[in-house]
Amino acid sequence: LAKTTQPISMDSYEGQEVNITCSHNNIATNDYITWYQQFPSQGPRFIIQGYKTKVTNEVASLFIPADRKSSTLSLPRVSLSDTAVYYCLVGARFSGGYNKLIFGAGTRLAVHP
Amino acid sequence: EAGVTQFPSHSVIEKGQTVTLRCDPISGHDNLYWYRRVMGKEIKFLLHFVKESKQDESGMPNNRFLAERTGGTYSTLKVQPAELEDSGVYFCASSQTRDGGYEQYFGPGTRLTVT
């Protein structure tokens, strides 16, 4: 499984766009990039997953350059409720199989009024 | 639809005692996982069930931990006897098989304190 590196913490203000970058230099051909969010006293929650280029859903966007050695999670117009830890995970996605998730330290995002 | 539920939410026991944690996955999810976070550390995988079968136990720390999933529904994780280093938050997650299990749905966790 590819190792990931992401900032330990970030600060932002309400209404701003937040971009969290994750480095995964050793990503393999079969690996997908997945982001989870964790609020205090809750379990992690799936946000978004992608393989290449750009993926967007109702919560976030995920930008993946052509070399796939990094990815950027973009949160538009954050609010105080977006304060959480964000985890970048890289691993193969097996159809009909399973994946044990390998969590790193994550990025602690603090959104201020 | 109900999410993943875990019971109890908190448990405080003395060293040497036994504790059993329970997880009820989302209905219809064949995959069930246990993870834990000990103080100051990252979330670590413990084991994975597909229905009632253990697929991967590689994360189980030692034989004091026993996980079961009767009938492929709920799962229990028993710690016997508990040690101080077992303190932490134990998460359960479930997923459907069709998407490869990468989108896992986590429960709120059980906070275990061993004194």
Image (cartoon, rainbow, N blue to C red):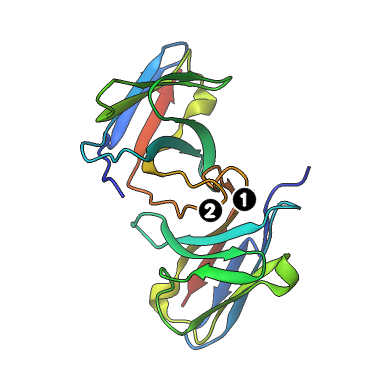
Q: Mark 2: which secondary structure?
A: loop
| Residue A85 in view | no
Q: Position of residue B91 (x, y in %)?
A: 54, 58
Q: In screen coordinates, is A103 left or right of A60?
A: left
In the picture as drawn, the residue positioned furthest to the left comes out as A25
Q: Position of residue B37 (x, y in %)?
A: 43, 59
Q: Mark 1: which secondary structure?
A: loop
Q: Quadrant of residue A52?
A: top left
Q: In screen coordinates, is A88 left or right of B99?
A: left
B57 or A21: which is nearer to us?
B57
Residue located at (40% from left, 63% from top) = B38
Residue located at (51% from left, 40% from top) = A39
User: Residue at label 1?
Assistant: B97
Circles 1 and 2 in contact, beta carbons < 8 Å: yes
Residue located at (62% from left, 45% from top) = B98
Residue located at (53% from left, 53% from top) = A97
The amino acid type, in three-letter code, at marker 1 is Thr
B77 or A82: which is nearer to us?
B77
Label placed on residue A97: 2
